[in-house]
Image (cartoon, coloured by chain):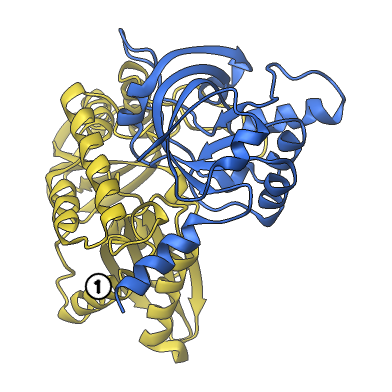
Chain colours: A blue, B yellow
Amino acid sequence: MAVRITTPLSRETARTLKSGDSVLLSGVIYTARDAAHKRLCELVAQGKPLPFDVSDAVIYFVGPAPAMPGQVIGSAGPTTSYRMDPYSPVLIREGLTGMIGKGKRSDEVVGAMKQYGAVYFGAIGGCGALLSKCIKSAEIVAYEDLGAEAVRRLTVEDLPVTVVIDADGNDLYKKGRADYLASQE
Amino acid sequence: MREIQASEITAVVRRLCMDANYHLAPDVTACIERCRREEPWAPAQEILDRIIENYGIADAKNCPVCQDTGLACVFLEIGQDVHIAGDLAAAVDEGVRQGYTEGYLRKSVVGDPLERKNTGDNTPAMLYCELVPGDRVKITVAPKGAGSENMSRIAMLKPADGVEGVKDFIVKAVEEAGPNPCPPIVVGVGIGGTFDKAALLAKKALLRPLGKHHPDPVYAALERELLERINALGVGPQGFGGKTTALAVNIEKFAAHIASLPVAVNINCHVARHQTEVL
């Protein structure tokens, strides 16, 4: 059974989620990927305010396809997360509690998740047409010059994600593979 | 000598960019659906069901299967009895520009790898031209996403490493990639040639229909054995565990230097896109 979560995602709620949980996520989330993360972290380093409130926020690592006429947004599946690894710990320290992407994370990211209370969700990569149906509104809030990489505020309804790494550092990529291999013995 | 206007190339490239991004080819969907039937692990079955649902939506609505609509890799086989009137490379780029702009495809190209400013129209294409006998032009557009491309690997092995060294390198590349390239993946392999040739062979191997093996029985057997080894890793769809880590292993090979055994592994995701048209 899927757990229903509505953002903002507090650190306390983030800590209740466990690796392997299916989650239907609703509420406001923000998009950011490589170039936007670089700029956000530069602002943090300069002590300047971020273009959106990162406290208890969830960032979706996605660069959506352009919306066709009548669409809110184009295809919008996750991008590979490790490219955000140099930046995520900075944002977690600033209050970020959730990230949505796909693929492995670094020890530094997992360390920050455990220290502050944050969770890493996986969405199914290569399913952008399906996932975009859960996005009910989209507006650019920063870095419009980056095109697909601009920061967007999305309102999502029942976005299907899985807790890959929880705030205790448990990792579904390790456990899922081990469980499957054990079942084949 | 037959003459083809460059503008005809533009029109075909434009159309293929859109078609490839909206509609997965029947060999790809048939392979994914067969893997779904053969997948024993329930969580993996569920992910494969979502993947099948997703490409069904894209196909029906003419929208991109994946938001990463890729770099436009364009392969031209140009008959040596054809004269193309106009600037060929510019015509291909114009086709990409029109296809990606009018088709609502994502613009994912930065003009300079260090400056990293988006070109805004997904140009330039990654263009490869080959001269072949005849008076036709075969145009293949293969949009290539970066999540899987970034997990690709190349090695200059020693001849002493032999076929076992080749196999181990390929399997290790897939295992280390794990969940990152959006498994189930297609594994394109180039063996032989030079450093650059091996990489191009690996990319071209991704263009071969899934389920169609190399004509040389030795390489066909190698493809089967590697697929079995990779699907025993347990990585599974999206890396959450399961049998279906790879949909296919396609190998292309070429002659090599007496001192070299290059091996390139070009990984593609399950959104394995390519469309071809002949002029």
Q: Is residue B57 above or below residue A89?
A: above
Q: Which residue does the image show at 45% across and 67% down from the upper left?
A: B175
Q: Position of residue A5 (x, y in %)?
A: 49, 29
In the image, what residue type sits under mark 1?
Answer: Glu
Q: Which residue does the image show at 35% across and 47% down from the upper left?
A: B128
Q: Is residue B274 visible?
A: no
How many numbered markers are drawn?
1
Q: Where is residue A15 in the image (x, y as percent from the top left)?
A: 62, 41
Residue neighbourhood size for the residue with mark 1, other residues' Cα within 10 Å, grouped as few (<14), some (14–19), many (≥20)? many
Q: Which residue does the image show at 65% across and 35% down from the upper left?
A: A12
The quadrant of the rendering that contains the N terminus of chain B is top left
**Residue B167 placement: quadrant:** bottom left
Which residue is under mark 1?
Answer: B223
Q: Is mark 1 on a helix, strand or loop?
A: helix
Q: Is residue B138 left or right of residue B232?
A: left
Label 1 resides on the chain identified as B
In this view, the residue farthest toward the top is A70
Q: In this view, does A52 lie to the left or right of B97?
A: right
Q: Is residue A161 visible?
A: yes
Q: Position of residue A3 (x, y in %)?
A: 43, 35
Q: In this view, does A25 lie above or below B219?
A: above
Q: Position of residue B263 (x, y in %)?
A: 42, 72
**Residue B14 placement: quadrant:** top left
In this view, the residue farthest toward the right is A47
- Frontmost residue, B231 versus B215: B231
